[in-house]
Amino acid sequence: MTRFIHDRFAKEYLEELLSPIGTVNIGRDVTSEVREIDVYFTPTTLTPKYLETLGVLGRMASATAIFEPFRNPVSFSEICSCLGKLLDVRGELERQARRENTRYDDAQLPKLWILTPTASEALLSGFHATPDAESWPQGIYFLGEHLKSAIVVIHQLPETPETLWLRILGKGKVQQRAIAQLSALATDDPLRMIALELLYRLQSHLVVETKPEFEPEERELIMAIAPLFQEQLEAAQKQGIEQGIEQGLEQGLEQGRQTQQRLILENFLQVRFGEINSKMTAFLSPISKFTAAEFTVLLLAISMLTVDEAGRQQAVKLLAENVLRMRQNELGDLLPTALTNLLALPVDELTLFVEQLPQLSADELRARLAR
């Protein structure tokens, strides 16, 4: 079970990191046997600065590529299967060239990158996989030139910023150290936020979808991920403290915490869905006043939503529901009806109502939302 959870994480992780510079196709089918490519990447907008930020992964993404990530050490048969997928793509390109009456150019063939946490010397030598120390860091082994393939042995990669985004896909202590290094990045770093969201979702899947008796490695991974969201909230508290000192007022402390918490939520929604619509904006202010525990639970729930229009609508509903729960005692069983009526309000009325919500009496609240 956990292997499929990690596979899903790896595909979503690569999709999020590579989509700003190209087209990412998850689960691309090839041949009549329907062999599925994990991640098929086609560059469209190669932004030098972004590629540099991705480090070694950015170099791999500078041309059309196939990424095949493995949670457990890749086997002989799995490497053969990956090579088969690459040759299937080559066959597709050749057939397309014949249909279009053009000449096939092998430069069109994508580069295959097999990502494995570890690999034995016997496995690598069996495929004549050799390093290219002059051009690539330790841990990357290239097959014959015409095969256009490489095996990336993640635990051998040097622990530098240039390899961080690959080492996140490692296993055991290698992955845990990479996760720890995320905390060294700025809390508003977009790539940190993307990785953080996906890691926290991975943690929730491991907790929800697996047995309570975790393997030690999975337990350690969960423990490594858990503090990261808390760091965001501690940063909010720290800014609040600084603002409070400057103002010399306790009010400054709370305002600073709320301001930073709102900023975290705004950035989180924008990274997650690409934009923040007007209904989302209406709920930012009251949610910024949540306690750290309530706020963390809400972020976790949003991270579980799909990244599409349906997920965006669910996010709005989730925000509205959390705001109404502040008055749950007065609404009681009327909460579902109140939620439907609240979301049906035009944006201007919705924004005004949310602002007035704390001051409304129980009778006014029921009269306006529980009809």
Image (spheres, helix red, strand yellow):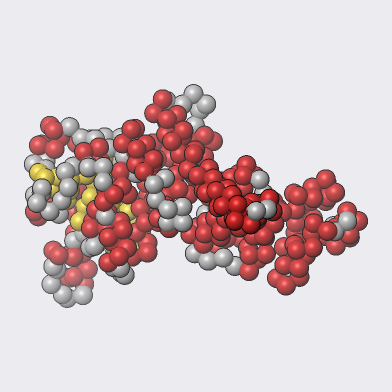
Vertical side of 112 occupied by 225: above or below: above
Q: Position of residue 196 (x, y in %)?
A: 45, 48
Would residue 206 be visible to someone looking at this image?
Answer: yes
| Residue 304 visible, this angle | no
- Camera-side residue: 316 or 356? 356
Residue 123's image quarter?
Answer: top left
Q: Can you give x and y, in whole percent of width and height, for residue 109 in the image?
A: 18, 61
Assign the C terminus to one quadrant of the image.
bottom right
Vertical comparison of 305 with 21: above or below: above
Judged left or right of residue 180, residue 101 is left
Question: What residue occupies the far bottom of the structure in this picture?
Answer: 101
The residue at the point 10 percent across, 49 percent down is: 132
Camera-nearest residue between 300 and 124: 300
Left or right for 96, reference 26: left
In this image, 345 relative to 139: left or right?
Answer: right
Q: Residue at x 35, y 53 (%)?
A: 14
Which residue shows up at 34% across the image and 56% down it? 28
Q: Quadrant of residue 338?
A: bottom right
Residue nearest the viewer, comparing 36 with 151:
151
Quadrant into which the N terminus falls? top left
Considering every residue shown, the one lying at the far right of the view is 363
Residue 79 horizontal side relative to residue 128, left or right: right
The location of residue 262, given as percent across then percent down, is: 60, 57
Foreground residue among 93 and 247: 247
Q: How many marks?
A: 0
Residue sitting at x 29%, y 49%: 161
Where residue 102 appears, as percent x and y from the top left, is 15, 75
